[in-house]
Image (cartoon, rainbow, N blue to C red):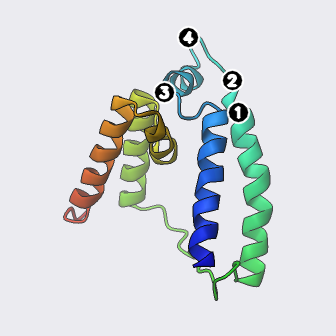
Amino acid sequence: MIKDFLVLISGIIFGIGLTLSSMTNPDKVISFLDIFNLWDPSLIFVMIGAIFITSPTLYFLSKNNTVVLNKNIQLTSNKNVDKPLILGSFLFGIGWGMIGLCPGPAIASIAFLNFSSVTFVICMFIGLYISKFIKL
């Protein structure tokens, strides 16, 4: 029960952070990605902040191999760059650039009842389901 509560609190904090940083605003994200027109570099600070928090956390987790309220964590040892990784990265980048949303901010933006966000999340889950049947 306490584990579920901590997961909920972590998700709420993550969603608030995405909202405060304007990552849930597709126009802001697209203007960040548009480096040749009206580039808005402000989201660089969001990314830098995420790197500064995540890097030491992952280092600590990889050394201790444990997390709060769980027995162990399994970080991947796969270092291969293969066809599914390249194709998935390509599709993610194309979708992010076209729509201005990626999964985390899209789910957080559902709270605003934005039609495009809800449509994006529904299509994302349909795509996840269909991808289970595609063999590369």
| Front label number (3 vs 2) | 3
Mark drawn on residue 26: 3
Q: Which residue is mark 2?
A: 41
Q: Residues within 10 Å of mark 2 (few under 14, many from 20)?
A: some
**Label located before the other in sequence (3 or 2):** 3
Circle 1: residue type: Ile
Spatial separation of the CA atoms under disc 2 and disc 4: 12 Å
Spatial separation of the CA atoms under disc 4 and disc 3: 16 Å
Give the total number of marks visible in the rendering: 4
* Quadrant location of the C terminus in the rendered image: bottom left
Circle 3: residue type: Pro
> In this rendering, would 101 be left or right of 42?
left
Residue at coordinates 70% horizontally, 83% vertically from top-left? 65
Mark drawn on residue 37: 4
Please say whether residue 75 is visible from this viewpoint: no
| Front label number (3 vs 1) | 3
> In this rendering, would 127 be left or right of 62?
left
**Label located before the other in sequence (1 or 4):** 4
Please say whether residue 116 is visible from this viewpoint: yes
Q: Which residue is mark 1?
A: 44
Q: Residues within 10 Å of mark 3 (few under 14, many from 20)?
A: many
Residue at coordinates 64% horizontally, 59% vertically from top-left? 10
Callout 1 secondary element = helix
Residue at coordinates 76% horizontally, 83% vertically from top-left? 64
**Label located before the other in sequence (3 or 1):** 3
Q: Residues within 10 Å of mark 4 (few under 14, many from 20)?
A: few
Spatial separation of the CA atoms under disc 1 and disc 4: 17 Å
Circle 4: residue type: Asn
Residue at coordinates 60% horizontally, 69% vertically from top-left? 5
What is the x, y in percent for residue 6?
64, 68
Callout 3 secondary element = helix
